[in-house]
Image (spheres, rainbow, N blue to C red):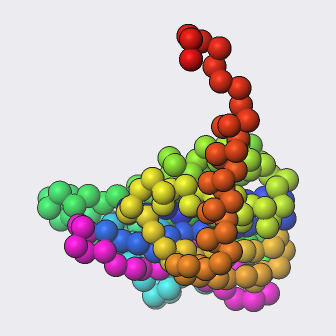
Amino acid sequence: MTYCVGILVDDGLVMIGDTRTNAGVDNIATYRKLHVFEQPGERFVAVASAGNLAASQAVLSLLTEGIGDPDSDNFATIWTQPSMFKTAQFVGRAIREVYQFDGKSLEQQQAGFDITFLVGGQVKGGQLRLFMVYAAGNFIEATNDTPYLQIGEHKYGKPILDRAIRHDTGLQDALKLGLISMDSTMRSNLSVGMPIDFVLYRRGALQAELTHRIEPGEPYFHDLQDRWSNALKAAHKAIPRPPYGNG
């Protein structure tokens, strides 16, 4: 299991992902799930993955190694896509390519072809966009009304984002809220865990403003966890008790 979130606001884009993979209580490892494809001044693309690790890694390999055009000798890669819409389509195509080779055998072994991707970024001359690409290769896009998308174990962090994230939320506040949603997910699901990777991208920059890995024990994240827990305790104490019964 994993948890990744992309938040698209007026100022830019935040992408966050955990790194834990779990194939049983005695087989826990760390793998990067958030990947940045960047040509400063030309394109910035961040891709986060959730689901079957082998299938996800195969898709990521195809994004850079390329997929051949049956009508020519050309290879398409994530670097050759002229827009973010075409980039999301290309990720969907890579997923279908991997399914063609591995999907049926995975399903026969009851492993499942359960992968999803977040694809966010900007290509020179185009708009900053954020998509969620499904295992079938189709996708949806974040909008002003729904400015964030989640993959993996999303239910524990969703209420926080539903209440607080708006399209006009500041970029640093979007990062803070994304990290709070990650902490809430880790508190409720042991299969999501640190380190945490994130990237900040400011609209129009065509290169990342910040990429960072939060390691266990990092002071800011530890303080955020404590402050959020204390804030929740204070909030419930400040709300009057229900006027029902004799209690």
The residue at 26%/63% (across/down) is 103
Q: Is residue 99 magenta?
A: no
The residue at 81%/73% (across/down) is 202
The residue at 18%/65% (across/down) is 105
Q: Nearer the viewer, residue 33 or 120?
A: 33
Q: Quadrant of residue 219?
A: bottom right
Q: Is residue 129 visible?
A: no
In the image, is residue 78 above or below residue 146? below
Residue 83 rendering spot, x and y as whole percentages: 69, 70
Q: Quadrant of residue 213?
A: bottom right
In the image, is residue 157 above or below residue 178? above
Residue at the limit of the structure toward the left, as seen here: 109
Residue 68 rendering spot, x and y as whole percentages: 43, 81
Q: Quadrant of the C terminus?
A: top right
Residue 87 rendering spot, x and y as whole percentages: 60, 70
The span shown in magenta is 23-47
